[in-house]
Image (spheres, helix red, strand yellow):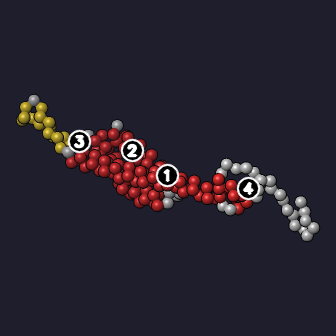
Amino acid sequence: MSKGNGETVVDVPAEKSSNPNLASTKGKGLAAGVATGAAVVGTAKVIKHLRGWKRIVCIFDFLLRLFGFAVLLTAAITMGTSDQILPFFTHHFQFRATFQDLPALTFFVAANAIACGYLLLSLPFSLISIIRPSIAGARLLLLIADTVMLALTSTGAA
């Protein structure tokens, strides 16, 4: 509808809403409810709620990295420092075994040491993910590197 002075006025019919925040805008239309910020406040609550879950997942990721570091370090040290003396038939003929005698065990120790070092170096990236959970680049880098380390430790254990 046009007024005589060059202004255009558009009538927006009032819509009924089940949202109690928009109840005060009765008769003013939906545009008045958005102008008051009711929809923006609802969206901000949803974003803050999602950011909280991302932070919890990042904290869990950090704790798993610490636990994995401890386990891999323990496995590498235990296997690297173990010596076995195996008696055959008599005590005069003995066989001494270390992890260096078998290439598979050497690879196991090396794979665990490499994965342990990776987990130690990945802890700062995990902390960055906790501080800023919306940064996807650091999490993507960790995901790709974690996959490579999973393959390495799986082949070392096999």
Name the residue that disc number 1 marks: 53
Find residue 56 and report its horizontal and vertical position in percent: 45, 52
Circle 4: residue type: Lys
Question: Which badge, 3 or 1, is on the more N-terminal residue?
Answer: 1
Which is in the foreground here, disc 1 or disc 2? 1
Which is in the foreground here, disc 1 or disc 4? 4
Circle 1: residue type: Trp
Name the residue that disc number 4 marks: 26
Name the residue that disc number 2 marks: 152
Circle 2: residue type: Leu
> Going by the picture, which residue comes out furthest to the right?
4
Q: In the rendered view, does 74 fall on the left or right side of 14?
A: left
Question: Which badge, 1 or 4, is on the more N-terminal residue?
Answer: 4
Which is in the foreground here, disc 3 or disc 2? 2
Say the numbered circle drawn on residue 101.
3
Question: Which badge, 4 or 2, is on the more N-terminal residue?
Answer: 4
Mark 3, other Cα within 10 Å: few <14 / some 14–19 / many ≥20: few
Which is in the foreground here, disc 4 or disc 3? 4
> Compared to 118, does 152 lie above or below?
above
Q: Residue at x 41, y 43 (%)?
A: 151
Q: Residue at x 7, y 31 (%)?
A: 90
- Where, quadrant-wise, is the N terminus in this rendering? bottom right
> Compared to 105, does 21 lie above or below?
below
Q: In the rendered view, does 54 fall on the left or right side of 108?
A: right
